[in-house]
Image (cartoon, helix red, strand yellow):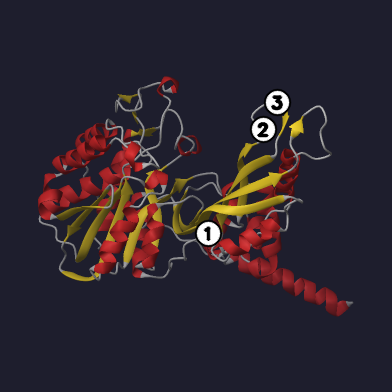
Amino acid sequence: MKILILCIVVLVLVLVVRAATFKSTDNSSRHREEVEVNSDRARENLATLVRYATVSNRNFDKTDKAVFAAYREKLKQLYPKVTETSDYRELGNTAMLFKISGKNSERPTVLMSHYDVVRVVEERWEHPPFAGEIADGYLWGRGTIDTKITMVGIMESLEDLLKDGFIPENDLYLSFGGDEEVAGTSATAVVEYLEKNGVKPALVLDEGGAVVEGVFPGVEKPIAVIGIGEKGMCEVEFTATSKGGHSSTPPAHTSLGKLSKTIVNIENKPFKAQVTPPVEGLIKKVGPYAPFALRIIMANLWLFKGVVISMSQKLGGEINAMMRTTTAATMAQGAKQANVLPNISKARLNMRLLNNTTSDQALNFLKTLCEKDVTCKYIVKQEASPYASTESEGWKKVEKAVGDTWRDAIVSPYLMIAGSDSRHFSKICRDVYKFSAMRLSKEERELIHNDNERIQLEKIDQCVEFFHRLIVQL
């Protein structure tokens, strides 16, 4: 018994010491370059670009091609120095690719954004979605956050740098797509072009994480999360069959009932949670800022992984989504009339895959949860991307630019739970990072794809500052 008590005491001491020495990093004391931003030009240029209703469509024939072409010409007009310095080409349906030659071509960088936007219901907006109006300290309009702002950040910083005679150390490519919101082919066309020409980027940066608050329990400091990977995305169609007929003589289970029970089975048996490398990286960066009791857990993952998984499941939200393959039933269809028994009922489920779960493994698991006479198949199948390094030179450059721009923020890796065009670039580049250069409140994050999308004016300036600080390192 004495030996057991001694072992427990030693274990507690080890846990406490590890928590006490769980070290944090601080950006505030580090020297940083001050960046002068032409605020009026940046804001007006973003407002101008928002006025182009570049709404993409899965059916490219239904896209307003004239609006997209006009947008591309306007972007080049707004940034003449970038345009005249670059080797420019258009690829695929909508891609814009600028190449700015550096002093060498050994370690090129690709900076990405997309200029297509999702549909709007205009009558629900306080300010017209494509008017680019400035009111109450905000620039209003579709694309102000997602993601014409990052395109402006890149172009604004480069325009001034090139005017001052800047030449990047390595070749710099700007890849702007116009069909990201509909999972189009423009980004793949760029990847194919680069691969054909032997271009192997050392660093790719696209939209993704942001500077956020309140996402990690007990941590008050803002966290700048940089995506080092993104989940796969699949759409699964479920089909249930049963005898049709009149609803006055129903069977024990209609096809819609069988389908509903299958969906409930899936919701009641989620994929297992796990501490993935992005989550472990997040904990190591953010854990030192947590309250001491929570820090004991974070500093000793070797012992408390189960506790962390249980906590994430109870809290739900983004952290839980980073730790498991998720499913969400989003669409269903039965009979076309209330008094008719459906011979066939269908439903669709949206699934986001972790890096170590293949689409085939996930579908096989779903099949075990299907009721009798219910089958499932993929409509869309897209695997998760591999993880980028958090030890590479590319990571250090992005991390420095983020830390120097938002000095009060903890800079951390995370797993992007949505999708982006940059996933295609994993084919030619190991270190593909995802960071939207903005500080976004919970309310602002909820404006993405929502009514009344808008961005605070000073956040446009910060976006330009970030890209300036990154580009001068490339």
Whole-number angstrom distance, CA of label 3 to CA of label 2: 7 Å
Estimate the x, y position of residue 336 in percent, counting from the top left: 64, 29
Q: Quick one: label 1, few (<14), some, or many (20+) residues within 10 Å?
A: many
| Circle 2 SS class | loop
Residue type, numbered disc 2: Ala
The quadrant holding residue 8 is bottom right
Identify residue for label 2: 335
Whole-number angstrom distance, CA of label 1 to CA of label 2: 47 Å
Identify residue for label 3: 338
Q: Quick one: label 3, few (<14), some, or many (20+) residues within 10 Å?
A: few
The quadrant holding residue 366 is bottom right
Q: Residue at x 38, y 70 (%)?
A: 392
Q: Residue at x 84, y 39 (%)?
A: 252
Identify residue for label 1: 282
Q: Quadrant of the N terminus?
A: bottom right
Residue 47 drawn above or below residue 26: above
Estimate the x, y position of residue 368 in percent, counting from the top left: 72, 58
Mark nearer the N terminus (1 vs 3): 1
Q: Residue at x 64, y 66 (%)?
A: 301
